[in-house]
């Protein structure tokens, strides 16, 4: 079969775009790399790396520094790094008790960030959209005008249909079937793509790329303030389900005789390990928020038996649910974010005792449990990674065709 020149050209361009994407992903994930390191990481030839890096430099997406010696024979290899301000995204986070916005550039560098407290009564979509618009304008005002915005990423404490950014259900916000992506796109009026996802899914992504889980291909991330959210990475890829609803681990049924859940079911995991479960058992009023949880932690640290008993209850049920996830998914790593990250030193004994009791020995021996390294900003940074994804997947959109470039020098 004879292949016509148009098809050959299309195939050549497809390969070029894929190779540019491979280089940009490596630089985005690992920071500055020499051309020789890029050869080793991508499998491309030195001449291909030289040519493609030249295109990225000419487009302003990357810069080359002085050549460095790597302790191996041959000429020193120039060092390549992405230019953070060459393309930036707006990241937004809708948490139970706060709202946040950030400007994040290529390479994951945060260029501006702001977070404000949010009353739980202040939760209508109009109120939150207005507040986020104000925060976005604040961080946008801190960036040089020359830094082009290429996308918007939004993390929200709810069940999100990723295809159109509709929040199907957000019990802790009182939302159902809210077209959040459309509402925010209209309010922000930036004329760039907007992507919306569950905050725990994005916290997972951030920990995988920037935090405690770098290098872990099989990961479970559990987070939450009022309730419980989760994200799962299997074989290096996020487990999202057919519509993006996967990972709602807080609504796993664990106790048939348990308490009613905000989702409408009974005995969900969240009813045993959520904020109110902790506060009520510690003798405090439910709905006290972060300040009340921190009070319990302080009292436990001071030796309060009541506070520690409440934490032991949560730790036991946390281990109960995690055991099911370990048996089902066989992860390498469990990262505890949000409230669970802060609680970890106080629930370690009860959590691990329950894991030991209920997890299959072979899977138990392979999994490690650690607290988050990114803290409250994990979903916000994950939202930035989500918004940068189109550029990482196809940086050729921002790169001029090869035949318009000046002649490139050899390495």
Image (tube, rainbow, N blue to C red):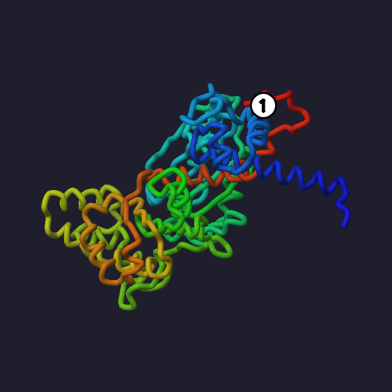
Residue 179 in view here: yes
Q: Position of residue 312 (x, y in %)?
A: 21, 62
Name which residue lies at 60% across and 25% down.
146
| Relative horizontal placement of residue 49, taking residue 326 as reference (left or right) | right
Above or below 83: residue 200: below
Nearest the eye: 383 or 21: 21
If the image is split into quadrants, where does the N terminus sit?
A: bottom right
Q: Residue furthest bottom?
A: 256
Q: Position of residue 253 (x, y in %)?
A: 38, 72
Q: Position of residue 76 (x, y in %)?
A: 54, 25
Above or below 204: residue 66: above
> In the figure, residue 346 lies in which quadrant?
bottom left
> In the figure, residue 12 lies in which quadrant?
top right
Residue 261 in view here: no
Number of numbered labels in the structure image: 1
Q: Position of residue 33 (x, y in %)?
A: 52, 33
Name which residue lies at 86% across and 52% down.
3
Q: Residue furthest top?
A: 66
**Badge 1 is on which residue?**
58
The crowd level at tag 1 (other Cα within 10 Å; few <14, some 14-19, many 20+) is some
Nearest the eye: 213 or 182: 213
Above or below 155: residue 244: below
If the image is split into quadrants, where does the C terminus sit?
A: top right
At mark 1, the secondary structure is helix
Name which residue lies at 46% across and 30% down.
71
| Relative horizontal placement of residue 335, taking residue 190 as reference (left or right) | left
């Amino acid at each position: 079969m004879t292949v016509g020149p148009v098809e050959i050209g299309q195939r050549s361009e497809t390969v070029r775009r894929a190779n540019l994407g491979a280089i940009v992903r490596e630089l985005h994930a690992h920071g500055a790399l020499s051309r020789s390191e890029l050869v080793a990481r991508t499998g491309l030839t030195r001449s291909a790396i030289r040519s493609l890096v030249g295109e990225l430099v000419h487009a302003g997406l990357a810069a080359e520094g002085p050549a460095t010696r790597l302790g191996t024979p041959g000429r020193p290899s120039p060092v390549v790094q992405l230019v953070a301000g060459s393309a930036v995204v707006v990241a937004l986070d809708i948490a139970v008790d706060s709202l946040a916005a950030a400007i994040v550039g290529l390479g994951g560098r945060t260029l501006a960030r702001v977070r404000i407290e949010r009353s739980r009564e202040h939760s209508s979509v109009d109120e939150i959209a207005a507040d986020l618009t104000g925060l976005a304008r604040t961080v946008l005002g801190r960036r040089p005008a020359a830094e082009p915005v290429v996308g918007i990423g939004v993390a929200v404490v709810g069940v999100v249909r990723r295809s159109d950014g509709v929040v199907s259900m957000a019990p802790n916000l009182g939302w159902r079937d809210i077209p959040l992506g459309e509402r925010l796109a209209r309010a922000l009026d930036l004329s760039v793509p907007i992507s919306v996802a569950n905050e725990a899914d994005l916290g997972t992504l951030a920990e995988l790329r920037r935090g405690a889980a770098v290098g872990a291909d099989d990961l479970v991330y559990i987070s939450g303030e009022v309730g419980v959210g989760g994200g799962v990475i299997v074989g290096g890829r996020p487990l999202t389900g057919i519509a993006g609803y996967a990972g709602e681990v807080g609504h796993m049924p664990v106790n048939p005789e348990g308490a009613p859940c905000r989702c409408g079911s009974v005995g969900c995991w969240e009813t045993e390990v959520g904020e109110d479960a902790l506060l009520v058992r510690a003798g405090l009023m439910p709905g006290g928020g972060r300040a009340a949880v921190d009070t319990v932690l302080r009292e436990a640290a001071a030796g309060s038996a009541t506070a520690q008993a409440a934490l032991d209850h949560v730790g036991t049920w946390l281990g109960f649910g995690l055991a099911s996830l370990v048996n089902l998914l066989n992860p390498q790593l469990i990262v505890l974010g949000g409230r669970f990250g802060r609680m970890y030193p106080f629930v370690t004994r009860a959590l691990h005792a329950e894991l030991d009791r209920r997890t299959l020995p072979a899977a138990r021996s392979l999994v490690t449990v650690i607290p988050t390294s990114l803290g409250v900003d994990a979903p916000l940074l994950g939202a930035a990674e989500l918004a940068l994804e189109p550029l990482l997947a196809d940086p050729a959109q921002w790169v001029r065709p090869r035949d318009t470039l000046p002649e490139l020098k050899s390495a």
